[in-house]
Amino acid sequence: MNENKKTDYETILKLLQELIEAGKDTDRRLKETDRQMKDTDKRLKKTEQLVDKTNKSINSLKEMVGGMGNNQGEAIEEEFFKSLAQTMRIDNIQFHSIDRNTQRQCNGIQDEFDIIMSNTESVMITEVKYKFHPRDVKKVLKKMSNYKILYPQNQHLTVYGAIAGKILPAKSIEEAKKYNLFVFAHEGRNIKVLNSPDIICKK
């Protein structure tokens, strides 16, 4: 074997060895990449599980807080109902009947009334909330209007509106006064009238 052929053979051999080593290195890198991808996938799954668990905890907390809010609302409504049922009188107006959580649908209109007090001449629609926000005051006017539609047989009655709450911000009271609504607060077991409108509200 002459010198040139020997050199070519050694060169080829060297290149083959380099290719083999490069292949081994590539294989090692691929395996490392695969391992990293598996680790990443595990982390993602753990993260997804953690997020899912967190979301469930948040939803449970929302349900619990919502339930507490509903319970507070029902409790304060019960207090006002009992107090109003005991007195059956607001200022100089004597009522004969009282109803709670009345739902009615008529002529395509549906509504629910927390407390309705009535006599042969007038009706008092009272909306009760644990905290009565100013934005909720106008809803009473809508209910007063709906009452005449839902109870057409009572068109002759004078309709009064009232807001009642455990917490009554000053703005809510001012808003109620603006629309000539009664404002009821609770004082012990009794009803305290914070506002008695001079103008009779008719809808």
Image (cartoon, helix red, strand yellow):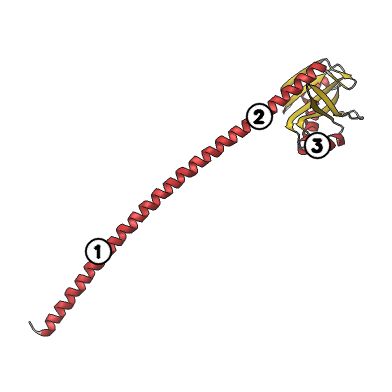
Q: Is the residue marked by circle 3 packed among few (<14), some (14-19), or many (20+) residues within 10 Å?
A: many
Q: Which quarter of the image is occupied by the N terminus?
A: bottom left
Left or right of 125 on screen, residue 1:
left
22 w.r.t. 39: above or below:
below
Q: Is the residue marked by circle 1 packed among few (<14), some (14-19), or many (20+) residues within 10 Å?
A: few
127 w.r.t. 27: above or below:
above
The percent coordinates of residue 125 (x first, y second) are 80, 25
The first of marks 3 and 2 along the sequence is 2
Q: Is residue 98 visible?
A: yes
Please report contact status of discs 1 and 2: CB closer than 8 Å, yes or no.
Answer: no
What residue type is disc 1 on? Lys
What residue type is disc 3 on? Ser
The dot on residue 70 is 2
Please report contact status of discs 3 and 1: CB closer than 8 Å, yes or no.
Answer: no
C-alpha distance separating marks 1 and 2: 68 Å
C-alpha distance separating marks 3 and 1: 78 Å
The percent coordinates of residue 150 (x first, y second) are 76, 24
User: Which element carries disc 2, helix, strand or loop?
Assistant: helix
The first of marks 1 and 2 along the sequence is 1
Residue at mark 1:
24
Residue for point 72% across, 26% down? 76
Farthest bottom residue? 3
What residue type is disc 2 on? Asn
Q: Which quarter of the image is occupied by the C terminus?
A: top right
Residue at mark 3:
172
The percent coordinates of residue 72 (x first, y second) are 68, 28
Residue 97 sits in quarter? top right
The percent coordinates of residue 123 (x first, y second) are 83, 22
Give the camera-side residue of 138 and 58: 58
Residue for point 90% across, 28% down? 200
The first of marks 3 and 1 along the sequence is 1
All told, the count of numbered labels is 3
